[in-house]
């Protein structure tokens, strides 16, 4: 079921126009697949989200230009060092929960090996994670290879948000959160480009919603999440411009910076990661001018803020067998 979004209430973030779906899949060649793993009787709320650049899986390009920014490194980001060192992305980007990270990376590798038309001697699977252990208290590694392959094989242009995929057990800013996405169109020198983001929101702090601070306590609810301000948040940015790796790393940083606009606390116990990549392979990457970079930065800031808000609006309240409750953000807070 498609949940309501910020714009359904007549509200918006920023001045730039969105893409057709206001999603990362507005960037041509990007698909998203998700598998949600829930067993309420056992307290399992987990899953995997796959961001799939078609040019990589269809062998049109061996690598895509990419950049990574680590706001706070209290987390696991498989493949991070090679992305930072070479400025290249070789595989789809998968997002899951902490202790499933390594099984997901291995399953991604198996999926790539099964599809390869020639022997693979080296590949760098990229997997990010958030710690959803406050809600998902059952099996700490519920995601299997079948779940991973289903997300990859089922990737499409529609992106479900909230309690799905890698965001199934996520809480953010005291509320139930999860997966969010958004996009913006930007004008460059000689063309229009699209910037899309997908956020796996699971961080501490107090929600700043369109210039208001809204906390669970102010609405009469108990705060969701661990008592210590821990969590994690992964922001993935895609764009249809073949930027160089240095500029992509700066674009990725704005994804992390944008979390502050909605109230992220960037606490010691949070892994805050931003990754940006181009969906376009080129032997001669574009160098954006300073004015163009500013426009892309603005698109990322607006998109991430809106994606986090939409992840909260799309989420559904969860109550675990052990009595924990993560309350979804009431839509009434956006009513006139």
Image: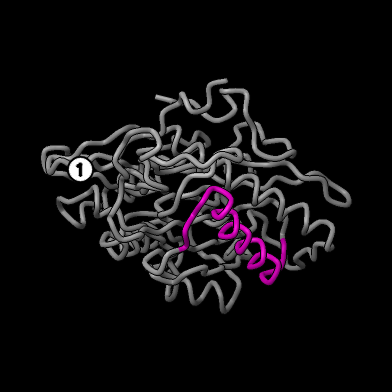
State which region is magenta: 243-266
Residue at image x 16%, y 37%? 40
The x and y percentages for residue 304 are 58, 48
Residue 322 sits in quarter: top left
Residue 103 sits in quarter: bottom left
Relative to 265, residue 303 above or below: above
The x and y percentages for residue 295 are 77, 52
Instruction: Using the image as rendered, state which of residue 285 and residue 329 is in the foreground.
Output: 329
The x and y percentages for residue 315 are 38, 35
Q: Does the segment drawn in magenta span residue 281? A: no
Q: Which residue is mark 1?
A: 324
For the C terminus, give its image quadrant: top right
For the N terminus, give its image quadrant: top left
Instruction: Using the image as rendered, state which of residue 6 and residue 143 is in the foreground.
Output: 6
Relative to 221, residue 121 above or below: below
Residue lying furthest top:
336
Describe the element under mark 1 as helix, strand or loop. Answer: loop
Instruction: Using the image as rendered, state which of residue 238 and residue 329 is in the foreground.
Output: 329
């Amino acid at each position: 079921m498609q949940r309501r979004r910020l714009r359904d209430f007549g509200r918006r973030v920023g001045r730039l126009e969105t893409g057709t779906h206001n999603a990362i899949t507005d960037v041509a060649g990007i698909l998203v697949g998700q598998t949600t793993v829930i067993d309420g009787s056992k307290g399992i709320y987990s899953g995997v989200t796959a961001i799939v650049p078609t040019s990589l899986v269809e062998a049109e390009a061996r690598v895509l230009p990419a950049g990574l920014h680590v706001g706070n490194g209290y987390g696991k980001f498989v493949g991070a060092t090679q992305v930072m060192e070479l400025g290249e992305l070789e595989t789809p980007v998968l997002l899951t929960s902490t202790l499933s990270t390594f099984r997901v990376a291995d399953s991604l590798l198996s999926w790539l090996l099964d599809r390869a038309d020639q022997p693979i001697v080296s590949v760098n699977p990229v997997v990010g994670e958030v710690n959803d252990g406050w809600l998902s208290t059952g099996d700490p590694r519920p995601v299997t290879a079948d779940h991973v392959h289903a997300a990859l094989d089922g990737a499409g242009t529609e992106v479900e948000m909230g309690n799905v995929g890698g965001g199934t057990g996520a809480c953010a800013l005291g509320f139930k959160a999860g997966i969010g996405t958004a996009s913006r169109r930007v004008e460059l020198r000689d063309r229009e480009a699209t910037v899309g983001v997908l956020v796996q929101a699971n961080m501490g702090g107090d929600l700043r919603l369109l210039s208001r601070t809204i906390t669970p306590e102010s609405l009469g609810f108990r705060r969701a999440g661990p008592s210590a301000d821990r969590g994690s948040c992964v922001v993935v940015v895609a764009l249809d411009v073949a930027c160089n790796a240095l500029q992509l790393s700066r674009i990725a940083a704005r994804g992390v910076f944008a979390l502050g606009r909605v109230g992220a606390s960037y606490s010691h116990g949070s892994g805050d990661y931003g990754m940006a990549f181009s969906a376009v392979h080129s032997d001669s990457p574009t160098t954006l001018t300073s004015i163009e970079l500013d426009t892309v930065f603005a698109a990322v800031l607006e998109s991430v803020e809106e994606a986090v808000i939409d992840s909260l609006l799309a989420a559904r309240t969860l109550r675990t067998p052990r009595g924990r409750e993560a309350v979804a953000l009431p839509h009434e807070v956006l009513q006139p």
